[in-house]
Image (cartoon, grey):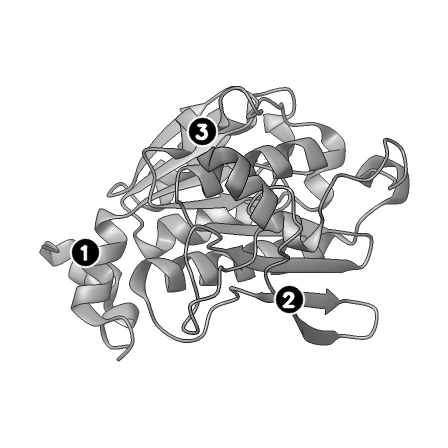
């Protein structure tokens, strides 16, 4: 149930037909894990807290640097040198005291990923490296958790939702992250943000789109991004959607992989 302050706080959600009281209650009861408190994670956490997601898990091992402030607007100049998760927890408390944040000053990897995602309803990955993305997506598949995952380029971004543990309306397996990208690129093949740069406001846009998709996943309205990759080109202000399907040869949920796991 929502108390009087929550009813006022979430009034603009409560009058939305697709959210209303039942949807807002689901948000209050939801547990969402956010991986990364950087360019994507910072705006994502703010909008999830503002939306009333009751329990937010946050994992990041980084500290605020001066170069972060060009795009990670959750942080201020005086926060340079501080733990990102510590600053984020303080910001959420100021924004919405009804939200509990479980902050972890650590790096998610293949060794701890399954244990970390297990206790959450939805996982949102805003990490900035391929090793973490694959560890998160593989763990979500094995633990049967929906995953909202996004990535940033210099002037472009992508966003999709993965429910690879489920089947679609035709009875076919939903695609996994490895159906899109079977394996990480060779080390050094793709320049890092520090090497190539990134348009600052693009991070806020993609983080906000992630928040919309997480809210949609929790509440259950509209057509989500399962089997669809949203591509944003900030140079030309173009939004396009690419459909993708389950690859029977993918190394995570393909026919051979499932057969080997069953055997």
What is the distance, in whole Å, between disc 1 and disc 3 at their CAs?
33 Å
Disc number lying in front (1 or 3):
3
Find numbered disc 2 in the image and state the secondary structure of the residue it sits on.
Answer: loop
Q: Determine the residue located farthest toward the front in the rendered image.
A: 263
The mark found on residue 232 in the picture is none
Above or below, 177 relative to 260: below
At 62% across and 55% down in the image, what residue appears?
Answer: 248
For residue 17, side relative to residue 76 (left or right): left
The mark found on residue 244 in the picture is 2
At 60% across and 43% down in the image, what residue appears?
Answer: 256
Q: Are marks 1 and 3 in contact (CB under 8 Å)?
A: no
At 80% across and 40% down in the image, what residue appears?
Answer: 193
Q: Observer-nearest residue: 83 or 142? A: 142
Find numbered disc 1 in the image and state the secondary structure of the residue it sits on.
Answer: helix
Q: Quadrant of residue 195?
A: top right
What is the distance, in whole Å, between disc 2 and disc 3 at their CAs?
25 Å
Q: Is residue 74 visible from the viewing direction of this image?
A: no
User: Mark 3 highlights which residue?
Assistant: 114
Residue 50 image position (x, y, % from top left): 37, 53
Residue 147 image position (x, y, % from top left): 48, 49
Q: Observer-nearest residue: 145 or 230? A: 145
**Earlier-in-chain disc, 2 versus 3:** 3
**Earlier-in-chain disc, 2 versus 1:** 1
Find numbered disc 3 in the image and state the secondary structure of the residue it sits on.
Answer: helix
- Structural crowding at the residue carrying mark 2, measured as other residues with C-alpha within 10 Å and reported as few (<14), some (14–19) or many (≥20): some
User: Mark 1 highlights which residue?
Assistant: 6
Residue 202 image position (x, y, % from top left): 70, 58
What is the distance, in whole Å, between disc 2 and disc 1 at their CAs?
39 Å
């Amino acid at each position: 149930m929502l108390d009087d302050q929550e009813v006022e706080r979430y009034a603009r959600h409560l009058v939305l037909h697709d959210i209303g009281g039942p949807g807002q209650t689901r948000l209050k009861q939801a547990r969402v894990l956010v991986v990364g408190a950087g360019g994507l994670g910072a705006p994502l956490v703010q909008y999830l807290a503002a939306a009333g997601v009751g329990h937010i898990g946050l994992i990041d091992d980084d500290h605020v640097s001066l170069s972060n402030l060009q795009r990670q607007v959750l942080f201020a100049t005086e926060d340079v040198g501080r733990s990102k998760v510590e600053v984020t927890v303080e910001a959420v408390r100021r924004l919405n005291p009804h939200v509990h944040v479980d902050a972890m000053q650590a790096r998610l990897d293949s060794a701890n990923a399954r244990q970390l995602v297990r206790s959450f309803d939805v996982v949102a990955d805003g990490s900035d490296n391929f090793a973490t993305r694959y560890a998160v997506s593989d763990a979500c598949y094995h633990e049967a958790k929906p995953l909202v995952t996004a990535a940033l380029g210099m002037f472009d971004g992508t966003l999709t939702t993965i429910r690879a543990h489920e089947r679609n309306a035709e009875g076919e397996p939903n695609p996994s992250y490895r159906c899109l990208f079977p394996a990480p690129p060779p080390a050094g093949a793709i320049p890092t943000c520090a090497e190539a740069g990134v348009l600052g406001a693009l991070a806020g846009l993609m983080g906000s789109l992630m928040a919309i998709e997480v809210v949609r996943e929790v509440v259950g309205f509209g057509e989500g991004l399962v089997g669809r990759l949203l591509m944003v080109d900030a140079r030309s202000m173009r939004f396009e959607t690419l459909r993708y399907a389950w690859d029977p040869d993918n190394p995570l949920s393909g026919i051979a992989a499932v057969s080997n796991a069953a055997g």
